[in-house]
Image: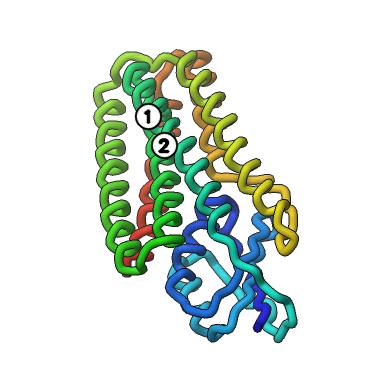
Amino acid sequence: MQKTVFKISKMDCPSEENLIKMKLSDIDGIKQLDFNLEERILTLYHNSNVNEIGNALNELKLNESLISSEDTATIITESTRSQSKLLWTVLIINFAFFIIEMSTGIISKSMGLVADSLDMLADSFVYGLSLIAVGGTVLKKKRIAKYAGYFQITLAIIGIVEVIRRFLGYESLPVFSTMIIVSVFALIANGICLYLLQKSKSQEAHMRASMIFTSNDIIINLGVITAGVLVNWLHSGIPDLIIGIIVFGLVIQGAFRILKLSK
């Protein structure tokens, strides 16, 4: 058994963590993955080739670097039941808020909420693909990853086109109160997901408890809330369009990462 430690600079939220899990699920001999999002550290216990692991991580473009690799006498016990239960929980929370934010975003004419709903959908894709990786075949996982990635890109492009159309046509102001209220609840939902992920780690003796200080989803929620305040203050829909285009860009970036898993 070997213990290998990687520094992954761009790993700062559960989405990247699950992408790494899915990517490394293709490699035989990996017994355990230990994530510390606060320090951006990944620790692996494995019998597989270190170079193969490094090459797989490199394909995700998360700026990884090998810190150490050494023999260890640690005994690893595997359990997928608790992992699957956790993934189902966060998947349901994210998909529920995708529906809530998409519907309220359309009703309130807020592109920020619509974009944030697609980010929630993107996370749902990631957690769903992780569930397939736990119990399904590699071929099935890669096929669904490809469909999910292209679907996500298509939705984001449609959203960007709508943002441009609204910017040129300048429609009526979005309902700022709906933007703020719904985003606050989405912020709470993301906080619950992060709490559950951390709690699941702390319950296992071989996992180090770690605080997650930053998350793309939480930053996006705060961005939409800020945009809502600015819409009311400036009496302009421009802040909503700006946060919308930023989030759509992040959704496309996440989709390309998912597509890398289908290769």
Q: x%, y% of residue 85?
A: 53, 47
Q: Which image quadrant for residue 195?
A: top right
Pick the residue in front: 176 or 41.
Answer: 41
Judge whether 188 appears above or below 41 on screen: above
At x 42%, y 61%, the residue is 135
Pick the residue in front: 215 or 63.
Answer: 215
At x 73%, y 77%, the residue is 74
Q: CA distance from mark 1 to mark 2?
A: 6 Å
If the image is split into quadrants, where does the C terminus sit? bottom left
- The residue wearing badge 1 is 99
Crowdedness near tag 2: few (<14), some (14–19) or many (≥20) residues, C-alpha within 10 Å: many
Q: x%, y% of residue 245?
A: 38, 38
Can you tell which mark lies on residue 95?
Answer: 2
Q: x%, y% of residue 198?
A: 67, 48
Tell me the element at label 1: helix
At x 52%, y 37%, the residue is 220
Residue contact at pointers 1 and 2, CB within 8 angstroms: yes
Q: Which image quadrant for residue 160?
A: top left
Q: x%, y% of residue 59?
A: 43, 71
**What's under tag 1, amino acid-wise?**
Ile
